[in-house]
Every structure is written in structure tokens, then in C-alpha cells.
Image (cartoon, helix red, strand yellow):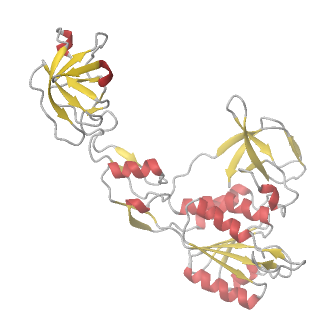
């Protein structure tokens, strides 16, 4: 069996890089940037007023002038006015250009205006450039704002807009097919017999994919029949970038998925990883170039393998820059008897000092998906047998 690290490396080597497309900025939330974004102008592009009040030359009050004639008003979006003299001031609004000849702003709370004259409060102290956001103090024209490989959330989309980009180049969303197999599965809402179980894994997989921003997701169900499986998998291999299967990958008589994929020309990259749960994980590549993740059918194994391998691989194929894994400390001791690396579901708890802890939520086996309710994800623990003490730091993988 492969180690977890070896499985990760092989997936990275064989999952193809997805193509690039140009999209309108409003459609890019959650996408992965595939070009650098540079500053269109200095930011701010002008000396910007940051408080409502009056703009003046700071030398005037230092020279004893405390009453100033209100020359005009400068609103945000208006072309800059020019101060007529140091005995004058210009009323300004937040966001406006600082008028030429002015170098400070006095907020409205420190002035009294009557009959066109602004009186400075006795305790008002005026320093050069107070309440002014200086031009270029955030970034200079031509500076790198966003680097290729960045996943675009609200701040990044706003930054791209500030750079004047109506469209940006991002990774094409992969076309995903989520496929369940098995004669025992019954759709939610349909009558279920005592010897049958609900078809739940696919819905969990689709929910996880959509939560991570993947929208091009189709789903299918195929019974444990070689001909039906071959027909449906051939169709999906021809029409999708990535297949995610649940079930049919162990060593039983009806675990047909690896054999059928081989018959369809798919190349097995690996089958079985030294981990618990999720040991029977299968990964391969079809002649069409489609990548195939065949996940174990037990629901805990399905979600763990999806989170640990599939979703990170999809983002890597989209060109997302790699990041350091999140780490967290165990809230209490946890004992494991397995000699394999293990994935332990956890919920999060914050103590009175604001520190986050991972509270172990072990399942009653890999079929106990109900125990996952309320968990944040899972931590990856080294092989045992061992007792991991409170404070043991492990990698955290969020659902």
C-alpha cells in the first residue's frame, strides 16, 4: 500500500492542469486566478479626504488665523478646486479630492460655521496632512496586487475591480460527475425496504463540492451490473473532466469498479492507501484524459477521502497556489490502536483565552456517518498504537 504522501504525489503528477478562460469580473467569485493583476494607478489615486469638514493650509492657524472664509464646497467625485488664499477654506466631504493649496482637514466636530465663515474650536490642533489619505500610500502604479494561483474571494474581486479589470483570466471549472454504485441504495423520498439503505453519499459529495465553489457537477447512479456500469462510465469518461465514484472498490465479488475501468482503458495509478478509514481508495486516468477517483462506499471513508485527496487535487489542477496545512491541538488525550495513519473527526471548541481546540469525535466505524454531524472536519494522526496527549498538534482538514 502507498503512504498518504505517495498517494498525494501521484495524484498531483497525473491530474491534468485545467484550461484558462476569461470571465466577467462578477462571475469570478471562488475561481482561481491565472494571471497577475497589477495596480492601474496609485492607490489612492489622489490625496483623499477621510473626514467631512474643511480643507485648509495648515500654516494659517499656526500664523494665528482661526476664522476662515468658506470659499466653496468640494464633494466626492468633483474635480479638485484650488484654495484662493490662506485665509480661506473649502468645505470637503469624505472621499473627495483634497483641494489644491490645502494640506490638512479639520473635521466638522472642531469647527463652527456661520455666515460663510468657519471658526476653529479653541482646542483644535492642525498638523500637515491630518485626515488626508496620501496619494500612493497604499500602493504605487504597476505594483503587483494579485498573483496567479490566488483563489478569488470578496477582497480579491474588489482589488481586481480597483485595477480596472472588467474581465480576468481564471481556471476553467472542471466538469465533475459524481456516481454512486450498488443495488442496495434507494433514493431519498422513495419507499425503502428493511434490507436497503438510503443513497446518501452522493448528496454529501455534491454538497461538499458546491461548498468549495464547484458548480459543474452532474450525478448518476448505476447498479452492480458490469454492462450497465461499463456503459454509464464510458459516457461519463467521454463528457467529464473528473469522475468521483462512491462504492464498488473493495475486494468483494460485486466490487466491479476497478475491473470495469480497466476494461474501458483506464490506467490504474494506485489502489489502496495505508490509512484508516479509506484504505481501498482507487485513482486512475482514462484514455480521454479524465481523472477518476473511486472512493470507498462507507460514508465516513467517502467524505474523508473526498476532503483529503479529491478537493485539494481539484484546486491544484485549477492552478491554486499551495498553502501550508492548517494545524490544531487536541483538546484531550486520544488513544488509537491502529498501526496505520488515521483520520479522526473533530469539532471545534474555543477556550476562555480565545484558543481553538480540536475535540475528538470518534465514529462507531466507517459506516457511522451520523457521528459526523456537528464536526468541523478531521485531524490526521500518525500510526499507532499510541495515546496522543492533550495539546498534540495535528493537521486539520475541514469538510
Q: Residue 1: tell me if it is visible.
A: no
Residue 379 as seen in the image, left or right of residue 25: right
State the residue at coordinates (72%, 76%): 180
Q: Residue 378: tell me if it is visible.
A: yes
320 or 190: nearer the viewer: 190
303 or 114: nearer the viewer: 114
Residue 348 as seen in the image, left or right of residue 152: right
- Which quarter of the rendered picture does the C terminus lie within? bottom right
- Which quarter of the rendered picture does the N terminus lie within? bottom right
Q: Position of residue 306 (x, y in %)?
A: 68, 63
**Image height of 167 relative to 256, above or below:** above
3 or 367: nearer the viewer: 367
State the residue at coordinates (16%, 22%): 115
Furthest toward the left, the residue is: 84
State the residue at coordinates (77%, 69%): 296
What number of labels is visible? 0
> In terms of image quadrants, where is residue 45?
top left
**Image height of 299 relative to 393, above or below:** below
Furthest toward the front, the residue is: 115
Residue 81 as seen in the image, left or right of residue 319: left
Q: Position of residue 152 (x, y in %)?
A: 47, 54
Q: Position of residue 384 (x, y in %)?
A: 86, 48
Q: Position of residue 282 (x, y in %)?
A: 72, 70
Residue 347 as seen in the image, left or right of residue 37: right
Amino acid at each position: 500500500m502507498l503512504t498518504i504522501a505517495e498517494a498525494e504525489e501521484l495524484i498531483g503528477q497525473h491530474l491534468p492542469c485545467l484550461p484558462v478562460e476569461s470571465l466577467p469580473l462578477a462571475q469570478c467569485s471562488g475561481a482561481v486566478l491565472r494571471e497577475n493583476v497589477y495596480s492601474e494607478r496609485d492607490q489612492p489615486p489622489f490625496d483623499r479626504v477621510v473626514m467631512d469638514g474643511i480643507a485648509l493650509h495648515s500654516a494659517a492657524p499656526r500664523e494665528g488665523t482661526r476664522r476662515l472664509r468658506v470659499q466653496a464646497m468640494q464633494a466626492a467625485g468633483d474635480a479638485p478646486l484650488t484654495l484662493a488664499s490662506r485665509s480661506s477654506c473649502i468645505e470637503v466631504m469624505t472621499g473627495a479630492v483634497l483641494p489644491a493649496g490645502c494640506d490638512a482637514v479639520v473635521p466638522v466636530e472642531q469647527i463652527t460655521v456661520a455666515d460663510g465663515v468657519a471658526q476653529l474650536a479653541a482646542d483644535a490642533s492642525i498638523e500637515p496632512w491630518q485626515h488626508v489619505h496620501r496619494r500612493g500610500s497604499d500602493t504605487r502604479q504597476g505594483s503587483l496586487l494579485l498573483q496567479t494561483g490566488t483563489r478569488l474571494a470578496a477582497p480579491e474581486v474588489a482589488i481586481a475591480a480597483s485595477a480596472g479589470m472588467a474581465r480576468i483570466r481564471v481556471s476553467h471549472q472542471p466538469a465533475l460527475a459524481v456516481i454512486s454504485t450498488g443495488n442496495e441504495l434507494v433514493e431519498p423520498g422513495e419507499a425503502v425496504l428493511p434490507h436497503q439503505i438510503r443513497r446518501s453519499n452522493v448528496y454529501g459529495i455534491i454538497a461538499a463540492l458546491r461548498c468549495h465553489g464547484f458548480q459543474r457537477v452532474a450525478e448518476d447512479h448505476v447498479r452492480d451490473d458490469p454492462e450497465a456500469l461499463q456503459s454509464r462510465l464510458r459516457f461519463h469518461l467521454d463528457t467529464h473532466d473528473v469522475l468521483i465514484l462512491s462504492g464498488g472498490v473493495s475486494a468483494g465479488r460485486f466490487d466491479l469498479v476497478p475491473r470495469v475501468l480497466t476494461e474501458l482503458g483506464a490506467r490504474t495509478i494506485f489502489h489502496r492507501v495505508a490509512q484508516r478509514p479509506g484504505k481501498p481508495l482507487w485513482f486512475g486516468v482514462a484514455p480521454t484524459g479524465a481523472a477518476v477517483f473511486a472512493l470507498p462506499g462507507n460514508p465516513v471513508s467517502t467524505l474523508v477521502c473526498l476532503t483529503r485527496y479529491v478537493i485539494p487535487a481539484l484546486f491544484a489542477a485549477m492552478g491554486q497556489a499551495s498553502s501550508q496545512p492548517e494545524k490544531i491541538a487536541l483538546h484531550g488525550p486520544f488513544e488509537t490502536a491502529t498501526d496505520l495513519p488515521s483520520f479522526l473527526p473533530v469539532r471545534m471548541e474555543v477556550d476562555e483565552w480565545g484558543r481553538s481546540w480540536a475535540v475528538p469525535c470518534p465514529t462507531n466505524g466507517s459506516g457511522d456517518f451520523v457521528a459526523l454531524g456537528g464536526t468541523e472536519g478531521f485531524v490526521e494522526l500518525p500510526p499507532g498504537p499510541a495515546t496522543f496527549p492533550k495539546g498534540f498538534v495535528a493537521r486539520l482538514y475541514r469538510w
